[in-house]
Amino acid sequence: MKIFLTGVAGFIGYHTAVALLARGDEVVGLDNVNAYYDPTLKEARLKMLEGKKGFSFTRGDILDRATVAKCMKGCDRVLHLAALAGVRYAFDHPDEYIDINIRGFFHVIDEVRKQKIPGLIYASSSSVYGGNTNFPSTEDDRTDDQLSLYGQNKKDNELMAHTYHRLYGTKSTGLRFFTVYGPYGRPDMALFLFTEAILKGNPIQVFGFGKMQRDFTYIDDIVSGIIASIDKNYDDEVFNLGCGRTEELMDYISMVETATGKKSEKEMLPMQPGDTTKSSADISKAKKMLGYAPKTTIKDGVPRFVSWYREYYGI
């Protein structure tokens, strides 16, 4: 299969590209390698993909419709992972979020329609659940109580995909990712920040006074769900991709301390705007329809990340 993958230099994009190439697929990657976080990490991911059989790369932007059209030509699937991620950055940069996450998504899905690509798989987020208090969250829960512009962006993407299916028959699958972590993870995510601070002897910031709960999902499990979605290629579906276990933030921090061999100094802080106190995924639909079966708990996943961090940064 020939797959057009946007955001290929990103955390999830890189790992998915590796898995697709390993099974013999052709990956046409697109990424603008922006500076939302340290581009050197993105360049490092790209360097490991360069030269792999079946991989090609274009340094470009999803806001450039002509580039999107050119890369997509002749592909069997489109995997759209490119986005401006994170909740808090949007407070000061709403225009960028609307451009990239809404207009950029439109460029991709409309080109899928125009070129009659057999299927689109795209990244949504657990953020769409917003203020929902039904736990674990199911795909049928209401998602109209948004707490962040990012969550609203992702909900808009789901609505656009559903509308395109009804109007044009465009096949699409949206994947609501729950707190993804692992080697080569994003530097703005909690695990990266905790590990970096602890190893450097700096205090860690613990928001929500440590009372937050998250469904931490290891990258390999997320990739397995993405690939199953590519292969199943449903007409118009949305799936939760989480671990299916809800963990206390303080337990997560304890795992980092154990893996680093160091105790942390904690700065206990209130919740940040846009955050939710709990995320918890009901993954029964993904299990039934995708054969999704996450295997990695934080007990195994956190030490793997810390080991990677030590090796990559020489600490």
Image (cartoon, helix red, strand yellow):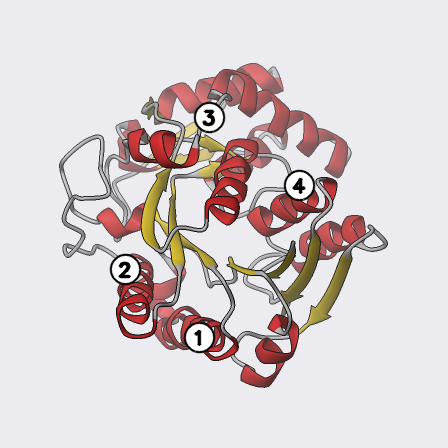
Looking at the image, is mark 4 or mark 2 nearer the viewer?
4
Amino acid bearing label 4: Ala
Q: Nearer the viewer, residue 91 or 107?
A: 107
Amino acid bearing label 2: Lys
Labels 4 and 1: the sequence-earlier one = 4
Q: Residue at x 53, y 36 (%)?
A: 224
In percent of width and height, residue 201 lies at 59, 29
Q: Residue at x 28, y 36 (%)?
A: 279
Residue 286 in view, yes or no: yes
The N terminus - image quarter: bottom right
Labels 4 and 2: the sequence-earlier one = 4
Q: Residues within 10 Å of mark 4 (few under 14, many from 20)?
A: some
Amino acid bearing label 3: Pro
All told, the count of numbered labels is 4
Labels 2 and 3: the sequence-earlier one = 2
Looking at the image, is mark 2 or mark 1 nearer the viewer?
1
Q: Residues within 10 Å of mark 2 (few under 14, many from 20)?
A: many
The local secondary structure at tag 3 comes to loop
Residue with the mark numbered 1: 113
Determine whether label 4 and label 2 are within 8 Å by CB: no
Residue 246 falls left or right of residue 255: left
Determine whether label 2 and label 1 are within 8 Å by CB: no
Labels 3 and 4: the sequence-earlier one = 4
- Residue projecting furthest to the bottom: 66
**Height in image: 50 above or below 117?**
above
Residue 5 falls left or right of residue 175: right
Q: Residue at x 26, y 28 (%)?
A: 211
Residue with the mark numbered 3: 294
Looking at the image, is mark 1 or mark 3 nearer the viewer?
1
Q: CA distance from mark 3 to mark 4?
A: 16 Å
